[in-house]
Image (cartoon, helix red, strand yellow):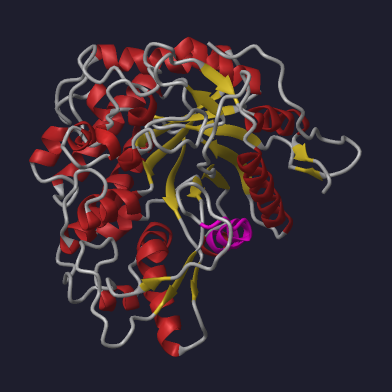
Amino acid sequence: MSNPASPPAVDVLDERSGLTFPPGFLWGAATAAYQIEGAAAEDGRAPSIWDTFSHTEGRVVAGHTGDVACDHYHRLGEDVALMAELGLKSYRFSVSWSRVQPGGRGAVNPQGLDFYRRLVDELLANGIEPWLTLYHWDLPQPLEDAGGWPVRDTAARFADYTTVMADALGDRVRYWTTLNEPWCSAFLGYGSGVHAPGRTNGADAVRAGHHLMLGHGLAVQALRAARPGAEVGVTVNLYPVDPASDTSADVDAARRIDGLANRFFLDPLLRGSYPEDLVADLSTVTDFDHVRDGDLATISTPLDLVGVNYYSRHVVAAPVEGVEADPAPSCWPGSEDVRFVTRGVPVTDMGWEIDAPGLTETLRRVHGYTDLPLYVTENGSAFVDSVVDGQVDDVDRLAYFDAHLRAAHEAIDAGVPLRGYFAWSLLDNFEWAWGYTKRFGMIHVDYDSQVRTPKSSAKWYASVIRRNGLAAQ
């Protein structure tokens, strides 16, 4: 249950001054299925790669798993009531593929679909727009056993699953995201192995990235066929990448990392091609023989919107001559020896540098690719939180949100067609390989009692939504 105690004093908005967002701006919050749902083996749900990964010794901090998580599966009504209290206009959630289609193909689990029907109906009853993400990293384990995303057939299976979801919920869900952060799925899952499924092969990572995008394109086509009125997009996690100095070597290091982090996805999705310099950088890793005629046309199937997840900036430097690259598996195939530089600026509990102007820069860059409406589909921060006298006064997170919303407004002023913002995350949750040791939520979750306590940032965000803007600084 939510904590009924009175909120601490936080800044409120001055209606007479400050920054106002465009009319109809979509204010939301986001979550992911494996991070919050729990009920991992209930009502016909079968294991995903994250179930297998988290149950493998040494993969997740303290051996934590998503078996229970925030128990959202059993607390759906309570959680939607909290969203309504915040005044959310939209809620971005993901579907557990293995809850709906346990084998990743074939038979559909009606109890799994019923859960998402109940969620969507509850959201609509509370005036909250459902925003459905089809894939947030939790591939059904049987598809991984058959080769996973490095195998082309997985893209076709994803399109089939998309049709199942469109048929079931397309009459009530307007907004659809195909993939969330395919870079993480490909390069953390199959390159460095720090995410599920934990494989460590650079060529597999590149193939996975391509087939994820192919699956995206096929999914867009499936949604168009089943629900012509749907608003369809994809969410990519992007980073400004700066050289540590203006030397040619550092500038080239930044080019290489920008290619893998950003252009690997932006160019095929929005321009229908891979950058030539990126293909050359990866020549020692793969010859791109997995790319077939017609793939890039499918991948670049026209969209209705683009989602941007933004957290931080990368600053990089060239390798030091005579110093060998770290032998550990890398999420930067072909550029394993590039060094990531810290600048001594404030960081979150994840160690990520806080760089709000990078959001403006990133949004303007994506707008350089397309005139499509853009949405910040994730933005947030982990900090160490404590419940004191029934309150969580998370001033650092509140300041983070405030700075990044100001950066988002600056992008709008610069002509970027930004239409909405989703805070990450609604709830503290299972933070992937970090387990329950990192908290991103606006709502504190006591994992023993499952008591939810809105933090100061939640109450502040509610005031932002209510006024559709920010106070003057």
Residue drawn at x 87%, y 35% is 15
Q: Main secondary structure of the magenta part?
A: helix
439 inside magenta stretch: no
Q: Residue furthest left?
A: 146
Percent across and percent down for residue 218 are: 29, 44
Say whether residue 63 is left or right of residue 353. Answer: left
Say whether residue 155 is left or right of residue 460. Answer: left
In the image, residue 465 sits, relative to residue 331, either above or below, namely: above
Percent across and percent down for residue 96 are: 30, 27
Q: Which residues are magenta?
A: 353-366
Percent across and percent down for residue 32 are: 39, 32
In the image, residue 320 sits, relative to residue 85, either above or below, namely: below
Q: Residue furthest right?
A: 16
Residue drawn at x 29%, y 30% is 163
Quadrant of the image occupied by residue 141: top left
> Considering depth in this image, is 276 or 332 the residue closer to the camera?
332
In the image, residue 144 sits, relative to residue 276, either above or below, namely: above
> Considering depth in this image, is 35 or 305 the residue closer to the camera?
35
Q: Residue furthest front?
A: 388
> Considering depth in this image, is 68 or 349 the residue closer to the camera?
349
Question: Do we see residue 127 in this rendering?
Answer: no
In the image, residue 356 sits, relative to residue 4, either above or below, namely: below
Residue drawn at x 64%, y 51% is 417
How many numbered discs sit on the rendered protein?
A: 0
